[in-house]
Amino acid sequence: MCPRGRQRSALYWNRDVSNQGRLVPVHVCCEWKETGNNIDKQPGCKYLEMVKENGQNRVGCHVGWIQFRKKCYWFSQDAKPWVEAKGICALNHTKLAEPRTLSESSFLISYSQRIAGVYWIGISDMIEEGKWIYSSDQTVIQVNDFHPGEPNHHTYANCVVLWQKFDGKWVDEPCGENYRFICETEIE
Ligand SMILES: [Ca+2]
Ligand SMILES: [Ca+2]
């Protein structure tokens, strides 16, 4: 087990020479620094892994990341303001989760309900009030999973969270609030 604190566990694959070079999982403890990304300095501390099995390349999600179709998601334990959360995802070459289909949104909602948390996602209307866009490419949202009555806070609230008490549906909240967050990365 990793020491308590700012450590995160990750996993990488190693060849077991005593077992016909079979790939075996290796558990490592990665350091999570908010001010700089030193994660990659440790072997295995990457969040997408290319593994070779039976001569085939296979890309999968790391342990700790949840796969849904062609994306891997990471649900944070720490609560941060939205902009900081976005930065933490970016440090690891990922982005805040951007549900592009209703099934992606449903997956994120159901998983957040399962682990009982409130989570930022990468949607905001901070640039133009009422115009909800994905934060990575600033395109207008392709799905709308706001809870009935939401968004309702106008310029007071410009960021979207999956709101636990509303069955995980989207609500607008002030971006400076501290919530957990979801990073995503795509599998090519
Ligand atoms: Ca707003
Ligand atoms: Ca609201």
Image (cartoon, rainbow, N blue to C red):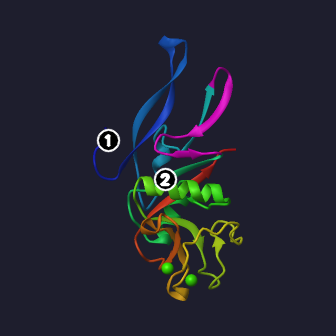
Q: Is residue 173 left or right of residue 136?
A: left
Dot 1 or dot 2, earlier in sequence: 1
* Whether the residue under disc 2 has CB within 8 Å of ligand 2: no
Please tell me in which quadrant of the rendered image residue 104 appears: bottom right
Q: Secondary structure at mark 1?
A: loop
In front: 7, or 99? 99
Q: Is residue 101 left or right of residue 115?
A: right
Q: Name the residue beneath numbered marker 2.
A: 111
Q: Is residue 117 magenta?
A: no
Total number of numbered labels?
2
- Compared with residue 21, is residue 78 higher up or lower down, i.e. above or below? below
- The answer to whether any part of residue 1 appears in the image is yes
Which residue does the image show at 45% across and 57% down from the upper left? Answer: 113
Most extreme residue toward the bottom, as rendered? 155
Which residue does the image show at 54% across and 56% down from the upper left? Answer: 108
Q: Amino acid at mark 1?
A: Cys
Q: Position of residue 73 (x, y in %)?
A: 54, 51
Q: Quadrant of the N terminus?
A: top left
Q: Amino acid at mark 2?
A: Tyr
Q: Is residue 136 left or right of residue 44?
A: right
Q: Name the residue beneath numbered marker 1.
A: 2
Q: Secondary structure at mark 2?
A: helix
The stretch in magenta equals 53-69
Which residue does the image show at 53% across and 54% down from the upper left? Answer: 92
Which residue does the image show at 67% across and 66% down from the upper left? Answer: 143
